[in-house]
Amino acid sequence: MKIGIVGLGLMGGSLGLALKKISTKYNLLGYDHNPSHKRDALRLKLVDAITEDFDEIKHCDVIILTIPVDAIISISQTLIDISSTCTVIDFGSSKEKISNAIPTSIRTNFVTSHPMTGTEKFGPKAAIEGLYDEKTMVICDIEQSNDYQKGVALSIFKDINAKIVFMGAKEHDRHAALISHMPHAVAFALAKAVVGQEDPKSILALAGGGFKSMSRIAKSSPNMWEDIFRQNKENLLQSIELFNKELVLCQQLIEKEQWDELYNWIAEANKLHDIL
């Protein structure tokens, strides 16, 4: 099976590593606009070959789009002449706009997915083995995909040992804003607050594990996260509003020295551990 991977950064490169473990089953063809990404992907053996001609990608059995949401939407418009047996899988982090933008004539070729995994690093050098191992792969609006394409996608996801979850695109975007997109916004804001101090180095000298975890998130790619925030704007704003209400409540309880109420507020937050 010939798989074209469009986008050879963290997600595409790590996917290549995972699939190359089954070298007799898949042949991987890479495509990327960045010349250094292409060189690194070949040197690191993330794919078997690189093509400069996107028509070669269009003739693959499977096309996997591991690029920003805007680029996925744009490329989907160029795929109207793919074979009826071609399977297109996208890894976009917001799903509804992608799902709605796919040309009607090839909508059944698409399996819109989102792997709930990643790191703050980017580019082919960031690719790691096992990135998808035991991680959740959300498949959205699966009823809009043909049975053949469903089977191909599920087989690939099984091979990389991902855990499958089915969900509507609208529901996915609402949940992703709350558990992924909003926490990134909070991490960026925290980093900005620290950097804005007169002596941030003194603050960082005291930083413990909690701060380091959040500051790691704040190192994430501006290009990627500007795209994500823009594409999921409405859901993200609602999530930020919910967070702001809780933060203001915390502030008020401290200002009024309502320590018992603050204790109960924290105890309520602790209940999240019963879910995770």
Image (cartoon, grey):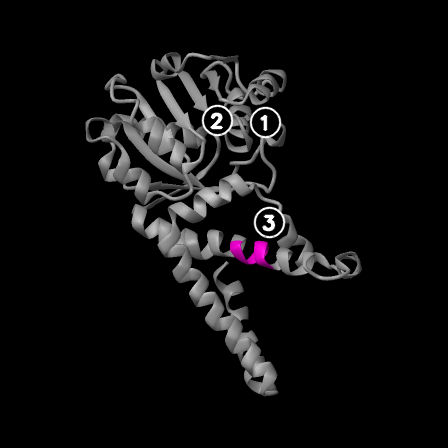
User: To which quarter of the image does residue 165 belong?
Assistant: top left
To which residue does mark 1 refer? Answer: 124
Query: Label 2, label 1: how many angstroms apart (C-alpha)?
Result: 9 Å
- Would residue 236 be counted in the magenta stretch? no
- What span is in magenta? 185-189
Pinpoint residue 39: horizontal percent, then vertical percent.
Answer: 60, 17
Pinpoint residue 223: horizontal percent, then vertical percent.
Answer: 51, 39
User: To which quarter of the image does residue 73 belong?
Assistant: top left
To which residue does mark 3 refer? Answer: 217
To which residue does mark 2 refer? Answer: 7
> Which of the marked residues, 2 or 1, is nearer the chain's N terminus?
2
Q: Is residue 58 above or below residue 142?
A: above
Q: Secondary structure at mark 3?
A: helix
Pinpoint residue 118: horizontal percent, then vertical percent.
Answer: 54, 40
Q: Are marks 2 and 1 in contact (CB under 8 Å)?
A: no
Query: Label 3, label 1: how many angstroms apart (C-alpha)?
Result: 19 Å
User: To which quarter of the image does residue 120 belong?
Assistant: top right
